[in-house]
Image (spheres, rainbow, N blue to C red):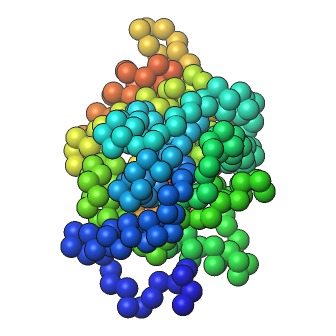
Amino acid sequence: MDPNVRPDSMERITNFELANKFIEEQVAAVRAQVGDKKVLLALSGGVDSSVVAALLIKAIGKQLVCVHVNHGLMRKGESEAVIDMFGKTLEANLVYIDATDRYLDLLAGVSDPETKRKIIGKEFIEIFAEEARKLEGISFLAQGTIYPDILESVKQAEGKKAVKSHHNVGGLPEDLKFELVEPIKLLFKDEVRVVGEALGLPHAMVYRQPFPGPGLGVRCLGAITRDRLHALREADAILREEFANCGLAEKVWQYFVIIPDIKSVGVKDESRYEGWPAIIRAVNTKDAMTATIEEIPYAVLHKIVNRITTEVEGINRVLYDLSPKPTGTIEWE
Ligand code: XMP
């Protein structure tokens, strides 16, 4: 039986009873696989790596070492949430690395989207490898691979081209060859969420909207600057807050702000004021291959526009992107 193929007999995990059964099986399987050895996990704070972390903490406690790399391209409050949940509440063995300066220095002046992605992905592997070398006696690498990732890599192996390069922890250097621990690799996303809640992770963390690996880096268009990135992070936090306030957060698949590298003339305190536009995108999709636009009520839009233009330094206009995928992709880069 191929361990990377979901057996037809595997029941879809739709409730806590099935989730708890899955957790029990995986706890036993992980213990049998790793014994008393140590396991390393790149904990991004995304749903998949968070669920793997919670599962492994349950199975092997302090034998798990979580590494959270803050590349400076996280949304507002995200790294703090990882530290609170895993470092404090679950008392995990957590290594936190603030690599903001390192990333922003490397990315300074780089405007090509694929080059930005490659730099972000490569640097991640480098930092993660540096940490792995510092830690003694690690034998295993845990990954939040899920079933759609396996299906996607099968498609790519068959020669179908990806539109954008995505990054994960694959491709560690030769001297760091770990055995993989992938406890959720046969699960679909909805099942991962049920398992996450059964493990006691907060609803907001488990139902977090998808967030690209390169983070805000592909939403701060062109060459990233610290001031524009800061404006993007603040505007995005306002959008998320307002979506949560009006019940859209749970309904819309992905919603975020993009800031292009252009300025327009505006007026503030009766003087000319050149600022960036913040672009709002809110899309619904099943598989991210195509996407439709969420119709945000005008009153909500007005409130968001008002808050972003008055609260965020550097932004003087807010635009709403109504383009579906295709022809637009979900992200702008
Ligand atoms: P696009 O922009 O291709 O996005 O329509 C489809 C989905 O993929 C996410 N995305 C990424 N995820 N690394 C990731 O892990 C990436 O480089 C990347 N680029 C896009 C995007 O947010 C959307 O959910």
Q: Is residue 20 visible?
A: yes
The mark total stands at: 0
Residue 56 position within the rendered picture, expressed as x and y whole percent measured from the top left: 42, 57
Decide: is 55 above or below 229: below
In the image: residue 74, left or right of residue 109? left
Taking depth in this image into account, of 261 and 230 the one nearest to the observer is 230
Q: Quadrant of residue 25?
A: bottom left
Q: Quadrant of residue 263?
A: top right
Q: What residue appears at the point 33 percent right and 68 percent down from the top-left corner? A: 23
Decide: is 140 above or below 128: below
Taking depth in this image into account, of 167 and 288 the one nearest to the observer is 167
Taking depth in this image into account, of 62 and 99 the one nearest to the observer is 62
Residue 217 position within the rendered picture, expressed as x and y whole percent measured from the top left: 60, 40
**In this view, which residue lies farthest toward the front?**
36
In the image: residue 303, left or right of residue 145? left
Quarter holding the N terminus? bottom right
Residue 32 position within the rendered picture, expressed as x and y whole percent measured from the top left: 46, 70
Q: Is residue 248 visible?
A: no
**In this view, which residue lies farthest toward the top?**
270
**In this view, which residue lies farthest toward the right?**
174
Residue 255 position within the rendered picture, expressed as x and y whole percent measured from the top left: 41, 49
Q: What residue appears at the point 50 percent right and 46 percent down from the top-left corner? A: 66
Q: What residue appears at the point 62 percent right and 42 percent down from the top-left corner? A: 135
Decide: is 157 above or below 286: below
Q: What residue appears at the point 47 percent right and 83 percent down from the top-left corner? A: 6
Decide: is 160 above or below 236: below
